[in-house]
Image (tube, helix red, strand yellow):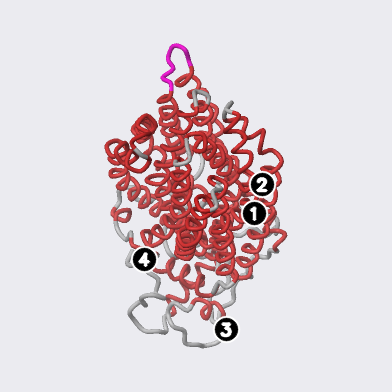
Amino acid sequence: MASERSPLIQPRHGDENNPGFENDVVSFVQQRRASIATEPEQVPHFFGQGLTRQVSRASMVPERSLTLVPTKSHSSTVGDVSDILSHHRLLAEPETSVKTEIKVLLRYTFPLVLTFLFQYSLVVASVFSVGRIGSTELAAISLSSMTANISGYAIIQGISTCLDTLCAQAYGRHDYNMVGVHFARCTYLLLLLYVPMALLWTVGAEPILLLLVGKEETELCHMAARYLRVISMGVPGYILFENAKHFLQAQGIFHASTYVLAVFAPVNAVLNYLLVWHPVIGLGFVGAPLSVVITNWAMSLSLFAYIYFVNGYQCWPEHSVFSKACFRNWGRMIRLSVPGVLMVEAEWLAFEIITFTASKFGTEVLAAQSIITTTCVLLYQIPFALSIAASTRIAWYIGAASKAAAKKACWAAILSAVMVGVGNFVVLLIFRQPLASLYTNDKTVIALATKVLVVGAVYQVNDSLACASGGILRGQGRQRIGGYLNLFGYYGIALPCAFVCAFYFELELLGLWLGMIVALVVVSLSQCYFVVKSDWDQIINESINEGVLEMH
């Protein structure tokens, strides 16, 4: 493999009339379109069925494919994919419609929703089990979870989103070896970053929390630091599971992680009871993070077993995960990872700053914030699943140079997001008091959480829209746009508005959430604007050129 940079950025050296390059481009698109299901409403998880590894460039062109002969002589510059394709006979672009794409996206989304709900239930189980001990313990788990999210999980999730672009587009080009190589590279990058993360959680957590929260909350900070020290042991398992999940999703295998989580979510609940509440082996507060550690490792091992023994191994790196290809050419991955981290970290960090601020109003307010955040994040799993499905679907179409189909898939994602957001709004508005009562017996905390959840319900529509449009940008390989918008929206608008409402107007927790709504409206509408104004020819050119260069 020579370079993995697009020739749109750095052209290949040589003459501009390059018939070999043209045939490579046409072969890519021809093979990709031939693989797309002919039935318009069939969900194309066909990629994982009867799949054989690409062994040579010639193998990419099926025997029955059309002859790659230009319809007229022309001179095209290397990298101008749309011009090359316009002068060759190709299989038609996939036939689809917005209605069909909505059906397909919802069908993709359902197993992913189960996956993310099961996965988030690991956190919820800890909150439930510890919350019944007391409000101080509930506040401690909120503080420790917040710290873990800012300094660990947000970074892991942000970096792993680069696979939504790299693996899905490579899979769309039928470059199955590169799907596995991208997966291995991302895993190594995250394991390297785990080292300073673990040091921070095990050594530096307590003094930092005391500095931020205040020395008057010594017991709270001590409990939160204990939680972080224990849970750090499960982070490598979490990294392996997250990357394996993206690796399979890029192949259209959305159900594997659902199966694994369907088994281990109940196991985690049982572990929480045994390690927190059991009269003989129960450890109290520290049993909750220990349950998560055990579950994370068990899930990662199970998902890798699924890949090896059931499905997904067809995209494993040809020469093993220790080949030189896995340790070089990290440039594009890092360029996509940085804005991916910004997209996730900007929102998560803003919410954690809100949680830190809520702690200034007392333990009961912090406990209510924990309830509100946990509930809203639980509902967030639905639009997040939709965004993953949309990202994968759109990346496949980009790999097939199917501009019309990709645009329809974008509109389908946006319309689906609005429907999901309205549904979440209705559910949260109607059931906010019973939901708050599930977390604690403290009537003051329940009353405060019920009041603020009205704002949380309004938050759902724009949250869903922002999530879906962010997924579209990832599928296009334009994470940087979402990263910049999230930075501006949350730090230029949300936090100033939240602080003014909370302190100047003395609305406290309610004011903090009102500020977040303002930012989300700006972010969601801005991302939708960039999606609607997408230069699809440029996006497709970059993807196809990248694939052609990776062949060499």
Which element type, helix, strand or loop, lies under badge 3?
A: loop
Residue range highlighted in magenta:
278-284
Q: Against 136, is 416 above or below? A: below
Q: Position of residue 425 (x, y in %)?
A: 67, 48
Q: Position of residue 20 (x, y in %)?
A: 42, 76
- Rendered residue at 48%/66% (across/down): 481
**Is 312 in front, or is 192?**
192
Q: Against 539, is 224 above or below? A: above
- Rendered residue at 45%/28% (across/down): 137
**Earlier-in-chain disc, 1 versus 4:** 4
Which residue is the site of mark 4?
4
Give the amino acid type for the residue marked by disc 2 in the picture: Asn
Measure how far apart labels 4 and 2 are at the Cα level: 42 Å
Which element type, helix, strand or loop, lies under badge 4?
A: loop
Which element type, helix, strand or loop, lies under badge 2?
A: helix
Q: Which mark is residue 461?
A: 1
Which residue is the site of mark 2?
424
Nearest to the eye among marks 1 and 4: give it. Answer: 1
Nearest to the eye among marks 3 and 1: give it. Answer: 1
Give the amino acid type for the residue marked by disc 1 in the picture: Val
Which residue is the site of mark 3?
71
Measure how far apart labels 1 and 2 are at the Cα level: 8 Å
| Snapshot quadrant of residue 230 | top left
Q: Residues within 10 Å of mark 4 (few under 14, many from 20)?
A: some
Would you say the residues marked 3 and 2 are in contact, meaning their CB atoms lie under 8 Å apart? Answer: no
**Is 51 in front, or is 546?**
546
**Earlier-in-chain disc, 1 versus 2:** 2
| Snapshot quadrant of residue 152 | top left
Q: Confirm whether the magenta stretch covers residue 283.
A: yes
Q: Is residue 222 left or right of residue 437?
A: left
**Is 224 in front, or is 50?**
224
